[in-house]
Image: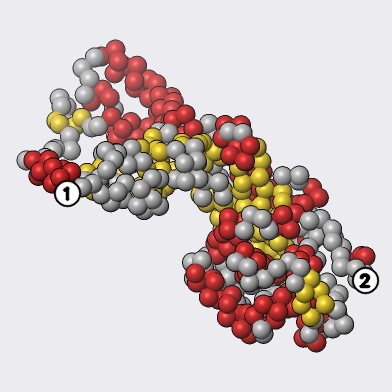
Amino acid sequence: MGTPSGIACAGGARRRPLLSWAVAFASGAGPAPSACLKRPLFSLFYFRNRILLRRLFSRALFLLAVAVAFSASAQVPQPPEVAARAYLLVDVTSGQVLASKDADQAVEPASLTKLMTAYIVFDALKTGKLSLTQTFGVSERAWKMPGSRMFIDPKMQVPVEDLIKGMIVQSGNDATVALAEGLGGSVERFVELMNQQAKSLGMNASSFKNPEGLTVAGHTTTARDLATLATRLMRDFPDYVPYYAIQRYRYPGTPAANDTNRNLLLFRDPSVDGLKTGHTSAAGYCLVATAHRAVPALGSGPQGQRRLLSVLLGASSENARAAESQKLLNWGYTAFDAVRLAPAGAPLVSPRVWKGKAEVVKLGRPEGVVVSVPAGEGARLKTEVVRPEPLVAPLLRGQAVGTLKVTLASGAPVAEVPLSVLETVEESGVFGRAWDAVRLWIQ
């Protein structure tokens, strides 16, 4: 039997659900209340004041709708207007994207390309294939590079560390090509390494044609891929990230007027410590900026630092890219709170494990669990761990086991955090495995 849309009442009218009746009443499309009421005094009052009542009712419904809409929108902070072709704001501490615009649109990266060049150079330093004191010569190709330069020449043998500073601080195309040739043997071979590394990092929308970022057909990436690259660069090579905070540098014998880092935020915001600028006529003015600020709720020392990363592409001027990036970073810190759900190395849950030498397995994240939530919502979070059941040994440290789902009190999703095994649980002996097998069978 279906549910009837209304129930007949005296006078032939039909009772409606409250909301539909209210809308109909407010619009004047529904039957008068007196059609279902037998109270003469109310009927008389209604007919004398029906226009006023409908206006009041309409306003009440409007205010109710506005309140509901405001409540829903308040849970997801809206980013500011940003004057750029594309942008992405990431909370590096939590791993969450806070805001974006056309983050997957193919764009020219200009000198942001040098982030990938640096990644490969830093990896060679970390693995011992290269040293900071090692020197590279300057080829005719490097010497004649157009665009921004370090002003080195073929008569020089330049230490790798100086070439790195020239590439980062001065955005020198000559220094970049010298590094590429010295490490890769040739620019072409180095570009192959760049594209291989891009695939390894999951930058599937990126294609590099040169190490310096000058405009070439097919040399493209996206804001999302650049955020991935910058995040991994900071995480994988923390010892070399301080190069990006250098405000001034020049190689001995080169022009003194060419010593200033083009990242204006290094001079405006003490919390900003990188990363890289870029500009060509096709790409516009671009900036990958990062800042770290102390958040007492996260703890003290390095654990209490919250890092944000902004990728801004296609701004109209050098000053605009700095101002718009600053706007994004400031908004991210104020519109979202960082909430620590588990400290570094501490288990978030310790579920039962079967056929193992330990009775429980510790699940969490080696770096801890931090989530970004709309400001003021941290105390009302809901968490749920979704994992396989039963958990059977062996379980190896670092093995992915389950996901932490975090939602707001309203049910709106906040984050899904992969959990891994913090301490290996080895398989128990034959008797222990047999006993647990019986217990599992009984269950």
Q: Residue at x 58, y 33 (%)?
A: 299
Is disc 1 placed on a helix, strand or loop? helix
From this viewpoint, is residue 60 visible?
Answer: yes
Q: Residue at x 80, y 87 (%)?
A: 140
Q: Earlier in the sequence, mark 1 or mark 2?
A: 2
| Residue 64 placement: quadrant | top left
Measuring from the top left, give residue 134's x and y in whole percent.
Answer: 75, 72
Q: Residue at x 17, y 34 (%)?
A: 6
Give the total of numbered labels.
2
> Which residue is identified by label 2?
253
Find residue 238 and name its label. none
Mark nearest the camera among 1 and 2 is 1
Measuring from the top left, give residue 309's x and y in whole percent.
Answer: 62, 52
> Which of the two residues, 225 or 123, is positioned nearer the viewer here?
123
Measuring from the top left, give residue 288's x and y in whole percent.
Answer: 66, 59
Q: Are marks 1 and 2 in contact (CB under 8 Å)?
A: no
Left or right, 169 with reference to 233:
right
Above or below 116: residue 328: above
**What type is the residue that disc 2 sits on?**
Gly
Measuring from the top left, give residue 170's x and y in whole percent.
Answer: 80, 66
Above or below 353: residue 63: above
Find residue 430 and name its label. 1
Can you say which quadrant of the picture contains the N terminus? top left
Left or right, 376 with reference to 133:
left
| Residue 187 placement: quadrant | bottom right
Above or below 413: residue 65: above
**What type is the residue that disc 1 sits on?**
Val
Left or right, 390 with reference to 243:
left
Is disc 2 placed on a helix, strand or loop? loop
